[in-house]
Amino acid sequence: MSLVLGLTGSIATGKSTAVEVFKKAGFPIVDSDQIAREVVEPGTPGLAAIITSFGSSVLQSDGSLNRKALGKIIFSDDRKREQLNRILAPFLLEKIVGDIEEAKKGSPLVIADIPLLYEQGYEKYVDLVAVVYIPEQVQMTRLMNRDSLDEEEAKRRMKSQESIEEKKKQADIVFDNQGTVAQLEKQVVDWLTAMELLKKS
């Protein structure tokens, strides 16, 4: 039996750091951000669906998706963001679930790295959910520093996801990232050890 752990957080909470610990321990990662790029590559049905809805102004001169142009449209308009999510949802679901099933064949633990796990209903495709948590005020500061954003823009980006406090309430496991990178890594290793997964990897 293979355990599927859905790993999520919110923007700037440090989820990528936790993912690296699982990767170093040798567990397969199903990366939804990577898959989101794959399903909109030139020639894919996903990109064709985006062009149909948003027009060719979201394309680069080489026919690939202009993420910046699309980002400007969706970050300033909730309805447009929801529209994009609806368009891509079936393509993402098929690929993410397919990749999870494939990875389960060769590992006792599979990590499904999905930032919008709760927002897009992926909790029903995983066995447990772990949330990488920091309080919202710390999240805001980190996001402003990391991406050189003003407070208004940081708030807008945070609002595009369910609040980290809500995610924390729903989680089966909480990795608290208010301390150092080493402390976060230790929490992940401790969980793996408690689950007796390190021995099998």
Image: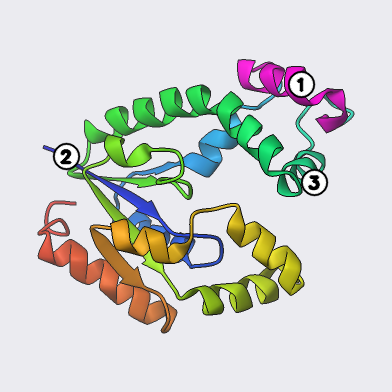
Q: Amino acid at mark 2?
A: Ser
Magenta stretch holds residue 123: no
Residue 2 badge: 2
Q: Nearer the viewer, residue 143 or 21?
A: 143
Q: Amino acid at mark 1?
A: Ile
Counting residues from the start of the chain, the first of labels 1 and 2 encountered is 2
Q: Which residues are magenta?
A: 43-59
Q: Is residue 71 left or right of residue 135?
A: right
Q: Quadrant of residue 1?
A: top left
Which numbered mark, 1 or 2, is in the foreground of this view? Answer: 1
Helix, strand, or loop for circle 3? helix
On screen, 42 above or below 133?
above
> Residue 94's x, y, as percent?
42, 23
- Pointer 3 residue: 72
> Residue 18's x, y, as percent?
39, 63
Q: Is residue 158 left or right of residue 108?
A: right
On screen, 139 above or below 26?
below
> Residue 105's x, y, as percent?
21, 30
- CA separation in Å, label 2 and label 3: 40 Å
Identify the residue at horizontal 51%, vertical 23% (top origin). 91
- CA separation in Å, label 1 and label 3: 15 Å
